[in-house]
C-alpha cells in the first residue's frame, strides 16, 4: 500500500510555525494531499508545500473564536476521504499534544477511513531551543509536565495546582499568556517559590518570536508586555535558569524589573 | 551571520530514528557539518545526510555502558569548534528532553563558542503516532508528564510516585523497559488503578518497532516480551486506550493475557 492512498487521512503535525521545523515526512505528505484542513496555529509558510491543485480549507480555532465546531470538522474530513481525496488534517505543533485528535481518529475509524498520525515538533521543544535551554536537568529537573491553560472565557482554570507546584520538575503551560497572573499566584500559593525561574515564549520559531526570561512572581508583568496576538508558552522551573542565556544573538529589546525581554531581529 | 558559521556548534535533535522524522532544518544542518558527534540512539540512516567529507564520531552512551564521559564529550565539542570546524552534537529525540544538553551548552558558552539548539521529535510523540493515539484527552487527560526511568544499575528509581499516580494525566516514561515491573507496582501502590491503560513502544518509528497495548498491572509481562535491545517508552493513562487501535495496518504478532503485541511488518 502506498504511503498516502486516495480515500485516506493523515493527521499531520505542522510544528511550531517555522517551515524548517516541519519533518521531512510532513513536507512530503503535504505535497501529496488533495485537500488540507488547517488550523489557525499552522504557520502560513507551511502551506506553501501544498501542491498547486490542492484545496486549502481553514478550520481554525482560536481562544474564544470557533470558526467551525469539532463535529463539522470531523464530517468534512470523513466526507473528503470517502469521496476519494487524499486528506490532511494539519495542526500546529504535535497532533498528540493538546491537538484534540481523538474525535477525528474516532470519526475516521467509525467510517472505515484509514487514518494515521505524522508527529510534529511541539511548542515546548521549540521554545526551549529558542531560549537555548534544556527542559530537563540531571538531578534538579528530572520531570517535565505539559498542561494547557485554555479555559472558557470567564472560567477559572481547573488545574491541580498542588501537583503542579513541584520544584523538581519543569512545567510547560500551553496557551497560558492570558492566564499568566492566575498561573503565577496559584503556583506560589501551592508552595512554588516566587523566585523560581520562568520564561514566556511568544510565536516560538517564527520571525516575530519574542522570549521573556524572568521569575515566577514577575511572570504576569512579562505576559502583559507580550502584547502580540500570537500563541505563547510559559515555562517554569530550574531548567529555565540553568541555561537562561539566549543561544542566538538577539537584540535585547528592553528590560523590566528582573525580566529579560528579547525579540527576534 | 550565516546559519552555521565555522567555529560554531549546533545541538541537533535527530528525532526517534526514522530519518523521515528529522526536521528539514536538522537535515540541512547535518549536511553542512564538518564533524558530527553522535549518540547511540541516533538512527543510523540519519547519518546518511552528512556530507561525504564530514567526520562522524560516536560518543554514544547506553545504560551501563558509557563509551565517553560527559566532560570528554564537552571537550571534544569545544576543541573542534575552536579549531574552526562546523560542529554538530547529534542526539536522539529532542535535545531539550532528557538530552543532557546543559553541560554542553555551558561548556560552549564558557569557551566563547556560539551554540544553538535545533529541536527534534521526542519519543513520546513518535510513540503516540505509532499507536494512532493522542497523549492528551479533553476532560480526561489534560496533563502530560515525562519522566526518565534511567537509574544506575542496582539502584531503585527515585521518583515521586504519589505525584505521578494521577489518573487525570498521561505519563510517559522514557528508558523504562527494564524497570517496568517496579514502575507498575509503585504506581499501583500509590493509587493508580491496575486496569489503567498502558502501552510500551520499542524502537518507535524504526523498521523493527514493536507496540504493546495492555493495562498497567500487565505491563511487566509486555516488557518481558519486548526482548530487543532497542530503547522503549512506556505510556500510562486513559489517552492510551481512548484510541488504542493501531493506526497502521500491522500484523498482530501474538497475544499474551490482555496485552496486544504488534510488530512492524
Image (cartoon, coloured by chain):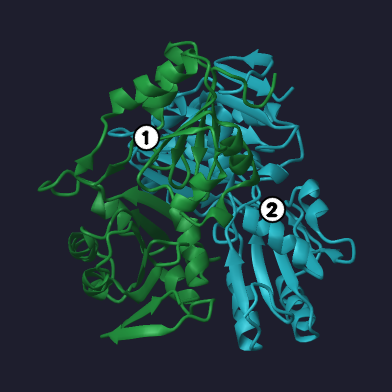
Chain colours: A green, B cyan
Instruction: Decide: is B250 above or below B161.
Output: above
Q: Which mark is residue A100?
A: 1
Circles 2 and 1: CB atoms closer than 8 Å: no
Residue closer to the observer: B231 or A54: A54
Q: Where is residue A263 in the image (x, y as percent from the top left)?
A: 40, 76
Q: Where is residue A83 in the image (x, y as percent from the top left)?
A: 48, 14
Element carrying mark 2: loop
Going by the picture, which residue comes out furthest to the right? Answer: B53
Task: Let me know if marks 2 and 1 both belong to one chain.
Answer: no
Residue closer to the observer: A162 or B82: B82
Residue closer to the observer: A185 or A17: A17
Q: Nearer the viewer, mark 2 or mark 1?
A: 1
Q: Which mark is residue B153?
A: 2
Q: What's the residue at 30%, 53% (across, down)?
A: A175
* Neighbours of disc 2 within 10 Å: few (<14), some (14-19), many (20+): few
Q: Is residue B243 in view from this perspective? A: yes
Q: How many circles with numbers are drawn on the protein?
A: 2
Element carrying mark 1: loop
Q: Is residue B195 in view from this perspective? A: no
- Quarter of the image for residue A226 reads bottom left
* Neighbours of disc 1 within 10 Å: few (<14), some (14-19), many (20+): some
Q: Position of residue A252 (x, y in %)?
A: 40, 84
Measure the C-alpha gap from mark 2 to mark 1.
39 Å
Amino acid at each position: 500500500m502506498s504511503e498516502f492512498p486516495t480515500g485516506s487521512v493523515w493527521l499531520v503535525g505542522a510544528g511550531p510555525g517555522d517551515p524548517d521545523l516541519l519533518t521531512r515526512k510532513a513536507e512530503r505528505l503535504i505535497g501529496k494531499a488533495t485537500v488540507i484542513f488547517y488550523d489557525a496555529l499552522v504557520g502560513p509558510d507551511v502551506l506553501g508545500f501544498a501542491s498547486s491543485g490542492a484545496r486549502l480549507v481553514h478550520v481554525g480555532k482560536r481562544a474564544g473564536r470557533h470558526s467551525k465546531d469539532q463535529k463539522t470538522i470531523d464530517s468534512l474530513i470523513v466526507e473528503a476521504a470517502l469521496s476519494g481525496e487524499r486528506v490532511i488534517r494539519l495542526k500546529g505543533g504535535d497532533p498528540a499534544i493538546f491537538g484534540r485528535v481523538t474525535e477525528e481518529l474516532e470519526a475516521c475509524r467509525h467510517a472505515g477511513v484509514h487514518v494515521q498520525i505524522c508527529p510534529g515538533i511541539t511548542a515546548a521543544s521549540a521554545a526551549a531551543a529558542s531560549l537555548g535551554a534544556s527542559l530537563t536537568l540531571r538531578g534538579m529537573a528530572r520531570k517535565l509536565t505539559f498542561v494547557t491553560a485554555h479555559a472558557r472565557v470567564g472560567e477559572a482554570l481547573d488545574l491541580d495546582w498542588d501537583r503542579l507546584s513541584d520544584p523538581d520538575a519543569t512545567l510547560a503551560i500551553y496557551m497560558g499568556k492570558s492566564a499568566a497572573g492566575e498561573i503565577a499566584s496559584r503556583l506560589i500559593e501551592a508552595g512554588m517559590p516566587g523566585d523560581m525561574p520562568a520564561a514566556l515564549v511568544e510565536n516560538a520559531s517564527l520571525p516575530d518570536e519574542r522570549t521573556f526570561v524572568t521569575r515566577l512572581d514577575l511572570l504576569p508583568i512579562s505576559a502583559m508586555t507580550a502584547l502580540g496576538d500570537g500563541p505563547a508558552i510559559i515555562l517554569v522551573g530550574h531548567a529555565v535558569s540553568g541555561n537562561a542565556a539566549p543561544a542566538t544573538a538577539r537584540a535585547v529589546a528592553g528590560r523590566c524589573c528582573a525580566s529579560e525581554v528579547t525579540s527576534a531581529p
